[in-house]
Image (spheres, helix red, strand yellow):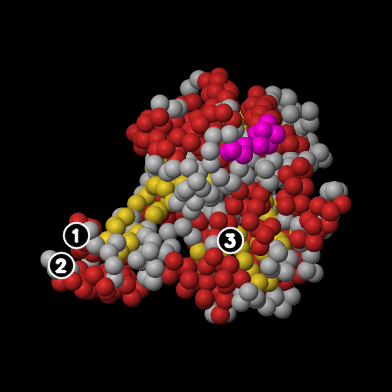
């Protein structure tokens, strides 16, 4: 089948969105491609279509668990076999998934980047027929990027064993970041040639960029000391689903409570909630049972909900990249939507404080490294591969340190490959049998079910006498004929008998140590890299502050220029354009007003009152034609619009 036929058969679309066909054809030619498409630009189709046209399995590397689950579910619903491996799966589940991916006719395997270097994953590489290596959120591989993740660097090593073309995708890459992505994902022979010659890497990528314009998305900035009043005005004035982004978990809860008290359907979401609650709230929001989700940036990544009508940032984000990506979750269905930034002077002071806290001195970072090992009683020259359940608040309190500074020190140690820091993850129950195998038969256990449980552990988990292993509570409970609560009681009692070491399942942050504890003065921290990262952070922060305070340039044009797109027309719908302060205005004010009326009434499925339109017009302070009632009347008389409800 052709690419168009695949698109029609599996997605029901008759044509591609801008740039999708070019990306697909480049990938099918066997060339590496970096695709930069705005949020909502249809990035998934760019790798899913060519993967369906080639034999083998597309390996999709993404940090977004919600995206993995969502896309796997959607592909399976279309009759396409797809699998994913994510945090929370035990070794047996991962092994079974990899086996099915290798031998079960699977077309897509989604994995997180940290999986790439595990011995279990690498043991399957040679038997997987990989058609494409897909790198989602590719900006994470660039140290110039705003969301660098060290595990992404493992993709370069993957290319040494897998001779498949790369399809890299991102919505937020400046020209410098785009070049860095291509060099870091280059084929091994190109990297080796550059190392030998001392010249830049000739990466061989094809760079394809769609315009960053989102013509249906209106960017609005409001400076106000009454931020809650402004937020409530947006929530009341814009029909449909919305997202409110906050930086602070506690503030999420407070703002959600405020909106509820004002009669709005709202709830909150952040990574500190337990997995069941997060899943329930996400599902309820997607169904429309919750209209407004107040959340940190832990929410929304990879969630394909097309009808989000507004995204509000109650405060200034740290970078245009983060803002553009989060704001871009509005209006993915192409209908009029709003990205609203509400701020005041306190936000500027907070951001400058955050900049200071985000870059503690290198001496401080090394001190945190040593205190971390002392906290867990790890001597020098030991500790490699230790997995530590880490409570940052308890650690900071025990050492008399600032919690935020500790967080950023740990993140920098992660960048320098000393450790991996995973925040707020679900940790499996882990068991180790602590007595000799032969001695088990001489123990007088108080409950006969304990013997059955030990037998199941020995049979199902080789190595359980040597290391604490993650176990599947559900399968263990089924084998032993008990419920999960009873199983946990049995495990606890076995630990009291000193037969096993029992580490219950938990939701926590975890640190994984990459090497033995180093002595003072031997902790590599790369001052040049540190200074580069600090300067890049400052540049992004200043750009975001400039965006918030801008009064002359169209908001959309400002963002386009930041991402390297110098040629773009004023959007005509942002607050600057509507105020008349932009350099250019739309020529036909009546046509702009007609378009707004069409979108407004379409968003209400044609069911509206004149009061609905008047409220929307006034609450958004739109600078469209004040004669909108007569324009609406003429459209009704011509039969283009239904009459309003009485």
- Answer above or below: position of 311 versus 276: above
Q: In terms of secondary structure, where does tag 1 sit?
A: loop
Residue matched to label 2: 445
Marks 3/2: CA–CA distance? 42 Å
Image point 45% across, 35% down: which residue? 371
Q: In terms of secondary structure, where does tag 2 sit?
A: loop
Q: Nearer the viewer, mark 3 or mark 1?
A: 1
Residue matched to label 3: 116
Image point 30% across, 55% down: which residue? 504
Judged left or right of residue 468, residue 131 is right
| Residue segment shown in magenta | 522-531
Count neighbours of disc 1 (C-alpha within 10 A) and say few if under 14, some if 14 to 19, many if 20 or more: some
- Answer above or below: position of 474 versus 595: below
In magenta segment, residue 526:
yes
Q: Nearer the viewer, mark 3 or mark 2?
A: 2
Q: Is residue 298 visible?
A: no
Image point 79% across, 31% down: which residue? 584
Mark 1 near mark 2, Cβ–Cβ under 8 Å?
Answer: yes
Mark 3 near mark 1, Cβ–Cβ under 8 Å?
Answer: no
The answer to which of marks 3 and 2 sits earlier in the sequence is 3
The answer to which of marks 3 and 1 sits earlier in the sequence is 3
């Amino acid at each position: 089948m052709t690419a168009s036929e695949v698109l029609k058969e599996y997605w029901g679309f008759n044509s591609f969105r801008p740039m999708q066909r070019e990306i697909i054809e480049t990938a099918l030619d066997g060339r590496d491609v970096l695709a930069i498409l705005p949020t909502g630009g249809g990035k998934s189709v760019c790798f899913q279509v060519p993967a369906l046209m080639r034999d083998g399995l597309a390996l999709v590397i993404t940090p977004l668990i919600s995206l993995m689950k969502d896309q796997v579910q959607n592909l399976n619903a279309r009759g396409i076999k797809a699998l994913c491996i994510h945090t929370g799966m035990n070794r047996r589940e991962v092994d079974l998934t990899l086996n099915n991916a290798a031998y079960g006719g699977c077309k897509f395997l989604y994995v997180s980047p940290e999986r790439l270097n595990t011995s279990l994953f690498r043991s399957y590489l040679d038997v997987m027929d990989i058609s494409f290596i897909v790198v989602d959120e590719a900006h994470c591989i660039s140290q110039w990027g705003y969301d660098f993740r060290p595990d992404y660097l493992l993709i370069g090593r993957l290319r040494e064993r897998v001779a498949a073309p790369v399809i890299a995708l991102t919505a937020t890459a400046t020209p410098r970041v785009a070049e860095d992505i291509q060099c870091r994902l280059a084929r091994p022979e190109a990297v080796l040639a550059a190392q030998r010659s001392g010249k830049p890497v000739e990466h061989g990528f094809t760079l394809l960029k769609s315009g960053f314009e989102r013509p249906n998305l209106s960017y609005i900035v409001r400076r106000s000391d009454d931020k809650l009043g402004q937020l409530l005005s947006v929530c009341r004035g814009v029909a449909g689903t919305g997202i409110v982004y906050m930086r602070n978990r506690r503030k999420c809860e407070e703002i959600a409570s405020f909106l509820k008290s004002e009669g709005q359907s709202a709830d909150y979401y952040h990574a500190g909630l337990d997995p069941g609650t997060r899943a329930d709230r996400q599902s309820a929001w997607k169904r429309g049972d919750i209209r407004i989700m107040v959340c940190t940036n832990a929410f929304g990544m990879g969630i394909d909900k097309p009808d989000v009508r507004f995204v509000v940032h109650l405060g200034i984000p740290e970078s245009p990249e983060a803002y553009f990506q989060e704001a871009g979750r509005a209006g993915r269905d192409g209908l009029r939507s709003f990205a609203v930034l509400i701020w005041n002077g306190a936000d500027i002071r907070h951001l400058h404080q955050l900049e200071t806290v985000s870059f503690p001195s290198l001496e401080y970072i090394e001190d945190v490294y040593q205190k971390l090992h002392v906290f867990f009683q790890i001597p020098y020259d030991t500790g490699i591969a230790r997995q530590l359940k880490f409570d940052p608040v308890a650690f900071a309190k025990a050492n008399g340190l600032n919690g935020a500074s500790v967080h950023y020190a740990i993140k920098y140690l992660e960048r320098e490959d000393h450790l991996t820091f995973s925040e707020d993850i679900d940790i499996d129950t882990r068991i180790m049998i602590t007595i000799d195998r032969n001695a088990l038969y001489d123990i007088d256990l108080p409950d006969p079910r304990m013997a059955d449980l030990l037998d199941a552990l020995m049979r199902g988990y080789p190595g359980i006498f040597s290391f604490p292993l993650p176990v599947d509570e559900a399968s263990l409970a089924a084998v032993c004929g008990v419920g999960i609560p009873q199983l946990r009681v049995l495990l606890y009692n076995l630990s009291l008998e000193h037969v096993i070491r029992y580490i219950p399942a938990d939701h926590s942050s975890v640190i994984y140590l990459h090497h033995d504890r180093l002595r003072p003065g031997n902790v590599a921290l790369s001052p040049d890299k540190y200074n580069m990262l600090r300067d890049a952070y400052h540049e992004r922060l200043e750009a975001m502050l400039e965006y918030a305070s801008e009064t002359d340039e169209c908001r959309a044009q400002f963002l386009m220029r930041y991402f390297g797109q110098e040629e773009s027309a004023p959007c005509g719908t942002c607050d600057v354009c509507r105020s008349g302060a932009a350099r250019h205005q739309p020529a036909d004010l009546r046509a702009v007003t007609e378009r707004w009326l069409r979108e407004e009434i379409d968003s209400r499925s044609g069911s509206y009152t004149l009061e609905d339109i008047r409220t929307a017009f006034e609450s958004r302070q739109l600078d469209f034609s004040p004669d909108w009632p007569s324009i609406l009347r003429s459209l009704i008389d011509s039969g283009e619009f239904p009459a309003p409800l009485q």
